[in-house]
Image: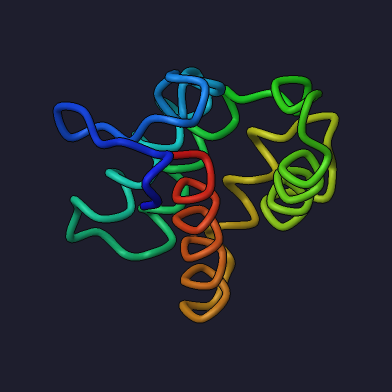
Amino acid sequence: MTASQPRVQGALFSDRGTKMGDKYPNVREHFFAAVRALAASADSIQARLIEANSSILNVTIDEFDGDLELKIKFAKLLDLLATDHDDLETVSVENAAHMTDFEAIKIADLMCDFFYEIT
């Protein structure tokens, strides 16, 4: 935190006085639910990833129109979840169910990294 980014009631604010992270409230909400699904269950990593996918698939790529870098990262995450974008939900469930633990953990880690970037 720099001197130009004061902390007010525990929230980090930008130079313009707006709370950082207010830019993508819908995305943050869904990624928070996904991270919670990944962390708060004793199920297999594949089952947790399937639950996390259901939250993430509520986010559209259009929500990142102002940020090309985030748009690309989100598109890559979607590609890892399901190569067939016509039926993302079904294909992502099938893909996650057949992933190795290593593959599922890698994607879960990318989801957490993405959530960190938007907060």
Please name the residue shown 51% across and 21% down the image. Answer: 16
Residue 115 lies left or right of residue 42; in this view the side is right
Instruction: Give the mark count.
Output: 0
The correct choice, above or below, for 24 with respect to 119 in the image is above
The correct choice, above or below, for 69 with respect to 65 in the image is below
| Residue 39 percent across, percent down from the top left | 25, 55
Which quadrant: the C terminus? top left
Please name the residue shown 40% across and 41% down the image. Answer: 34
Q: Nearer the viewer, residue 52 or 12?
A: 12
Q: Quadrant of residue 23?
A: top right
Residue 109 lies left or right of residue 70; in this view the side is left
Q: Quadrant of residue 7?
A: top left
Please name the residue shown 51% across and 81% down the image. Answer: 102
Q: Nearer the viewer, residue 15 or 52?
A: 15
The correct choice, above or below, for 99 with respect to 9 in the image is below
Identify the image's colour scheme: rainbow, by chain, secondary structure or one colour: rainbow
Please name the residue shown 51% across and 68% down the image. Answer: 104
Q: Nearer the viewer, residue 48 or 21?
A: 21
| Residue 107 percent across, percent down from the top left | 56, 63
